């Protein structure tokens, strides 16, 4: 049996973000991954967490999936706090990374090649107010051709820095003005079948 760490980064804001869609997508992720014989541990950041336990959860996991709303073009600030605390603790314990990969004796080694998380995978599942056509189109004013994965590179970089493979992200778009939740659920199932199911 493989192991999934499912991280819920939702942060409650009254009248803006109650978290219903996030909870729905978490449920779909858990249900689908269990079908692929994954044992699931879930961390709800807003409810609190133990830093050392989270380091252990990352060591235990074969795949980490972050389910998060997009607030101001990133995950809520509680997720950044979580990453700073968990990844710094892991580094101090000699886990996740050995350093940034470079050595004084071998200048050919690249920055970002000192990870210990090889063989692990990381995936984002995002809920956006932004519509799908805001991405991947150079004529769009804001993202100018960037994809959701491009926009979230600062989020995925810490996992890649530590050696994990970053999987293609999944996004629900236009969730405030034109939600299509049932379609999004079906697409998430298809996305998991393509990205995870092939490893079964």
Image (cartoon, rainbow, N blue to C red):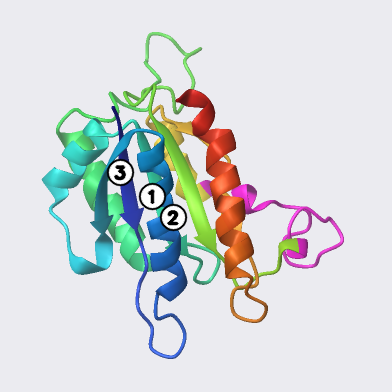
Image vertical order of residue 12 relative to residue 64, above or below: below
Label drawn at residue 31? 1
How far apart marks 1 and 3 lie (CA) works out to: 13 Å
Give residue 118's quadrant in the image: top left
**Pointer 1 and pointer 2: residues touching (CB < 8 Å)?**
yes
Query: Which percent across, then down, holds residue 190?
Result: 60, 45
Within-10-Å neighbours for mark 2: few <14, some 14–19, many 20+: some
Q: Whole-percent x and y of residue 67? A: 42, 57
In primary-sequence order, the first of circles 1 and 3 is 3
Which residue occupies the foreground of this view, 98 or 167? 167
Task: Residue at 44%, 28% (x, y): give it.
Answer: 112
Residue behind mark 3: 5
Residue 28 is tagged as 2
- In the figure, is residue 58 to the left or right of 80? left
Tell me the SS state at disc 3: strand
Image location of residue 164, percent across then percent down:
42, 30
Q: Nearer the viewer, residue 171 or 53?
A: 171
Please tell me whether the stretch drawn in magenta is mainly helix, strand or loop.
loop
Q: Position of residue 74 (x, y in %)?
A: 50, 62
Residue at image x 51%, y 12%? 108
Q: CA distance from mark 3 to mark 2?
A: 14 Å
Up/down of 191 relative to 101, above or below: below
Question: Which residues are the magenta region?
Answer: 133-153
């Amino acid at each position: 049996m493989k192991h999934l760490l499912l991280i819920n980064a939702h942060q409650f804001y009254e009248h803006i973000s109650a978290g219903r869609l996030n909870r729905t997508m978490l449920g779909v992720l858990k249900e689908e991954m269990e079908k692929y014989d994954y044992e699931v541990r879930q961390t709800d950041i807003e409810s609190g967490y133990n830093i050392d336990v989270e380091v252990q959860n990352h060591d235990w996991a074969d795949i980490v999936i972050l389910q998060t709303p997009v607030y101001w073009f990133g995950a809520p600030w509680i997720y950044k706090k979580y990453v700073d605390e968990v990844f710094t603790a892991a580094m101090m314990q000699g886990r996740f990374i050995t350093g940034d990969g470079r050595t004084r004796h071998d200048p050919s080694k690249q920055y970002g090649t000192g990870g210990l998380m090889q063989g692990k995978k990381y995936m984002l599942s995002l809920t956006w107010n932004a519509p799908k056509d805001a991405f991947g189109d150079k004529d769009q004013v804001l993202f100018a051709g960037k994809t959701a994965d491009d926009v979230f590179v600062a989020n995925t970089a810490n996992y890649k820095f530590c050696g994990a493979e970053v999987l293609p992200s999944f996004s629900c778009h236009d969730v405030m003005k034109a939600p299509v939740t049932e379609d999004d659920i079906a697409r998430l199932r298809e996305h998991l079948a393509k990205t995870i199911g092939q490893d079964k």
